Amino acid sequence: MAAALVAHLGTVLAAEGDVPVWLLLLGPAGAVGVYVGLYQYYRNTGKSHSFERETRVTAQPVTGQERKVDEVKGTKKTSIDGANQGDHRERVQRLP
Amino acid sequence: MNRCPKCGATEIQLRPSVGMLVCLFCRHEWAEKRLDETIANGDLSRLRGTTVGSGATDIAADAGALITMKCGGCGAEVVVNTAEQMGSRCHWCRHVLTVNEQVPNGAVPDAVLPFSTTHAVAVAKIREFAGKRRLFADRTFVREFTPENVVGAYLPYMVVDGNVSADVAGFGEVQTRRYTRGTGNHKTTYYDADVYEVHRRIDFTVDDLTIEASSERAHMNSAVNTNNVINTILPFDTENAVKWNASYLTGFTSEKRDQDVAQMTPVLEHQLLSIARAQVEPSVQQYDRGVRWERERVQVHGTRWVAMYLPVWLYSYYHEKNGTAMVHYIAVNGRTGETMGSVPVSKPRLLAAALTVGTVVEGIVIAMMGAT
């Protein structure tokens, strides 16, 4: 989120003139990056067992189907809303 | 009473360097059978229903942690607090008494994975881990750091095999066109995409998924505790676990299981769904704008639960600052030596480092802008 904010501020500032004023944000961004990075290195608050990768799983081939339901024209977004194919631990609506 | 099979003495303990029990009286060494050899394993894809090991059965509501044992040597009665240890010495005749028979309080598991790393190795690992994290560590922590105080503990886990099917459904997008409008600084990129409704199904088995069986250990919230670092040193080579023998615990502490199969089922299902989602990810690569899963289902056809004590070297440090207290752990996997920990930080030092870097970067940027 911080990165998105910085990028957004960057585009706003850059639009105001030819000098890349947004470069001024590099200082505060660097400070925040160093703080967060070092804190994580010491406290490891985000670490946990990667059971998705480290468990012995024997799987049958994946099956499934897909069908085209719609088209999107002229969107500025670079990916689908709420993309979560990589967030394996984020739970969605559970079917019985 | 647990006796040496050769001489009958009760002075038995684990020799971690070889993973064998040793009789301190006659030096005879032996090991219990591996659990895999004593229970029917079979093809996991044929697993049906819920099979629970005798050490993983529900904890009786009225079962306390204190049990009274009768000494086989002199007949005296000795009380053992199974919440912390699984044996005691008879204070009359000096025989060692161990809790080998199963008691319905969750303290006796089906199997135990003996320590194979020694205390000296654990101390070295912890010293190395903390040594790399000295500069910005809390000063009191650095002063009071004594890795020799590391304690070997057997922590309770459930090791679960499962036969599972999972379904996930949602939407995926494939980019069909990318174009730019506008000129100069006012260029904007636009995308066209096809939207697909996507469904995936996978049948799979998991072998030895390991889940915390102590509610205190299972409570992972990095704002108030550091249990996540103990979770991180998983997995263990649980296939080498041996049949329960309390003598493996002599000289170590242990923590009693307080979670039953029913209480742990939601955690198991969460992990199974996560595994399913990870397994289907390669099958949706063609959706280059990503997939949004909206619904998921897990059908558990069969599970097998085995209660197991797993070996962890734990260095704990009680840290209190501005009225808030936290216990920081540095944990070493008693089999693989994998180390993970939490070191309390010195916020003034962190801030100083962050501000220094920020100022230097800002200085360079200003100098560059001045030059142009």
Image (cartoon, coloured by chain):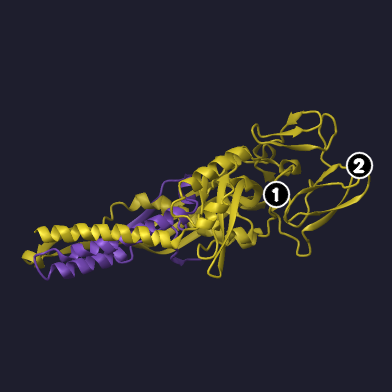
Chain colours: A purple, B yellow
| Residue at the extreme left | B183
Query: Marks 2/1: CA distance?
Result: 24 Å
Asked whether the beta carbons under mark 2 and mark 1 sit within 8 Å of each other, the answer is no
Q: Quadrant of residue B197?
A: bottom left
Q: Position of residue A43 (x, y in %)?
A: 47, 56
- Mark seen at residue B325: none
In the image, residue B274 above or below residue A73: above
Q: Which residue matches tag 1?
A: B253
The residue carrying mark 2 is B73
Amino acid identity at mark 1: Thr
Task: Pinpoint residue A7: horizontal percent, then vertical percent.
Answer: 23, 64
Q: Residue placed at 50% from the left, 48% from the top?
A: B130
Residue B36 to residue A48: above or below: above
Residue A21 position within the rendered picture, expressed as x and y whole percent measured from the top left: 16, 66
- Asked which secondary structure carries label 1, the reply is strand
- Can residue B257 be seen in the rendering of this structure? yes
> In percent of the image, x 58 and y 38: which residue is there?
B121
Label 2 chain ID: B
- Which residue is at a point 69% across and 38% down the rendered structure image? B38
